[in-house]
Image (cartoon, coloured by chain):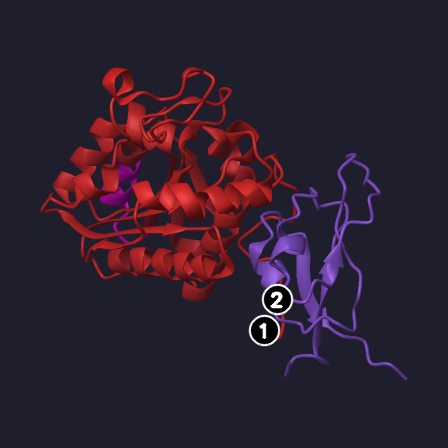
Amino acid sequence: MKNKDKTRPVINKERCKGCGLCINVCPMGSLTSPGEVNKKGLRYAILKNEDKCTGCGMCAVICPDCAIEMREREKKS
Amino acid sequence: MPKFEKPRSMKDVATHYCPGCGHGLIHRLLCEVIDDLGVRETTVSVAPVGCAVLAYDYWDFDTMEAPHGRTPAVATGLKRVMPDKLVFTYQGDGDLAAIGTSEIIHAGNRGENISVIFVNNGVYGMTGGQMAPTTLKGQTTATSPHTRRVEKEGYPLKITEMMAVLDGVAYLERTSVDSYANIIKTKKAIEKCFRAQLEGKGFSMVEILSPCPTYWGMSPVESMERIRNEVVKEYPLGVIKG
C-alpha cells in the first residue's frame, strides 16, 4: 500500500476497446465498466473507486492498447 | 510503480487490433525494451504478413515489410549490410511456423545474428481464423470445424523446440502474456533476446503465447485463462536454449 497516495490510473476512454482485462486483473476491484460506449461504440473502463486503488499499475501493464497511464494523484486540499 | 506511460518508441495512435489481442501488448513490451536499451535510433525491425502487417504504423523506429514468411531472409540481408544495427523480426505463427518454416530454420542454422519475436496464437488471425500448424489438438477453427484431429492434420508444430538442436541458435525462450507476472517475464525475455544479438552471440528467438479472442470465440479474459489452462500444457514455458 506504499503507493496509495502516489499514483492512479488515468484511462483514455477513446483508446479503450473494452476488453475488460484491466477490470479482471485489478486486485482491489476498483475498475469497472459503466456500460457506456465511446465514439467507436466500445464499452470503456473507468476507475470506479479511487480510494480503493493502491496504484500498483497492474491494469496499465496488462492493457493491450496503451489506454491506461499511471499518473501522480492530485493532492486533495 | 511510480509512473507508467506509453513508451517513446510507440506512436500515439490507436491500433487496429481486436479488443484483448496480444499484439498490442507485445508491441508495447518491445518498445519499452528498445527505450530501456536506448537503441531506438539503431533499430531496424522487419514486419510480417499477418495481423501485425501494419506494425510500422505503431512503432516509431525503422521498419521494413517482408513477403509472407520471408522475414528472416530480409533480416539476414539487413544485418549483413548493417551489422551495427539491432535487427529483429516480428512474426506470427502463420508467418513463421507455416509458410516461413524454411526461412526460420535456415536463418537459425546459419547462426544469423538477428532476433526473432514469434507470436503464437494458434490460428491465422488476419485471414479469418483458419487452422495453423500450431493449432492445438481438438481446437475448432474455420478450416477444422470438426476440431483438429491428429490422424488427419498432424500434431501442433513445436518450432522453438525444433530450433534448439541447431548449433547456430544462441537463445530460445517461450513466454506468455496471460498474466501480469508472465508479461514482466516476457519483457525480460525480449531484453535477453536483444542483448544476445548486441553481444554477437548469434540467432535468438522468443516465442510468446498470445490470445486471439476473436477466433477462439471467447472473451479476452477467457482467452487468457485458456492460455493458462490449455495452451501452456502443449507449449511449456521457459528457457529452451541459452
Q: Position of residue B229 (x, y in %)?
A: 42, 46
Reply above or below: A73 against B124: below
The circle drawn on residue B9 is: none
Numbered tag placed on residue B1 in the rendering:
1
Which chain does tag 1 point to?
A: B
The residue carrying pointer 2 sits among few (fewer than 14), some (14 to 19) or many (20 or more) residues within 10 Å by Cα, namely: many
Secondary structure of the residue carrying numbered label 2: loop
| Residue at image point 50% right, 47% down | B27
Task: Write down the residue under mark 2.
Answer: A57
Magenta highlight on residue B114 = no
* Residue B103 in which image quadrant: top left
From the top left corner, tell me how far across and down residue B227 is, in percent: 44, 44
Chain the render paints red: B
Name chain A's colour: purple
Magenta: main secondary structure equals helix
Name which residue type carries label 1.
Answer: Met
Please give the name of the residue rendered at 57% of the width and 55% of the height, measured from the top-left corner.
A62
Please determine whether, in this image, residue B97 is positioned above or below residue B59: above
Res B214 quadrant in image: top right
**Residue at point 82% right, 37% down?**
A39
Residue type at tag 2: Gly
Q: Are marks 2 and 1 in contact (CB under 8 Å)?
A: yes
Estimate the spatial distance between the alpha carbons at disc 2 and disc 1, rounded to whole Å: 6 Å
Q: Residue furthest left?
A: B167
Mark 1: which secondary structure? loop
- Work out whether residue B49 can be spotted: no
From the viewer's side, name the closer residue of B128 and B231: B231
- The chain containing the residue under callout 2 comes to A
Residue B46 is situated, as x and y percent measured from the top left of the image, at: 38, 38
